[in-house]
Amino acid sequence: MPTTEKMSVLTRLKRARDQFHDLTGLEALAVSGLTKIDGGWQVEVDAVEIPRIATYRVATDEAGDVTTYTRLRHLAPTPTAHAA
C-alpha cells in the first residue's frame, strides 16, 4: 500500500534526524535528499552550524539506525532584511 510505504519513509527520516541530533548536537532543519543504498538508506540533512549552514549525508541500516554521517558542504547564511 502506498500509505504504508510513505509512513515507512517518514519514520526512517525522523529516526535519521533524531539520531543525527543525538550524535552531533545539531538540529536538522530540513531533509534535502534520500537515497536507497546497499544495506540501508542515505539521508542528506541541512543543519545550522553557527554562523553557517551545513548539509550532511546520513546513512542508515535497514532498521533505520545511523551507520555513518558526512558533512558535504557549508553555505553562508543569507542576511535577514531589517527595516532601518
Image (cartoon, rainbow, N blue to C red):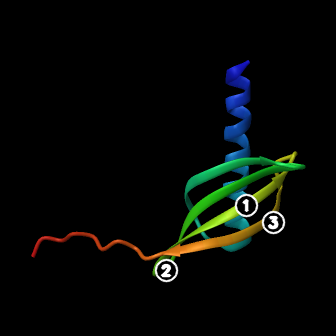
Give the labeled residue for mark 1. Answer: 58
Q: Residues within 10 Å of mark 3 (few under 14, many from 20)?
A: few
Residue positioned 73% across, 61% down in the render: 58
Q: Is residue 65 above or below residue 11?
A: below
Q: Residues within 10 Å of mark 2 (few under 14, many from 20)?
A: few
- Could you say which is closer to the camera, residue 84 or residue 37? 37
Q: Nearer the viewer, mark 2 or mark 1?
A: 1
Give the labeled residue for mark 3. Answer: 68
Q: Residues within 10 Å of mark 1 (few under 14, many from 20)?
A: many
Q: Position of residue 20 (x, y in %)?
A: 70, 63
| In-image side of 26 versus 16 (left or right) | left
Nearer the N terminus, badge 3 or badge 2?
2
Q: Position of residue 43 (x, y in %)?
A: 69, 54
For label 3, the SS is strand
Q: Position of residue 42 (x, y in %)?
A: 74, 54
User: Do tag 3 and tag 1 residues touch (Cβ < 8 Å)?
Assistant: yes
Q: Amino acid at mark 1?
A: Val
The quarter of the image holding the N terminus is top right
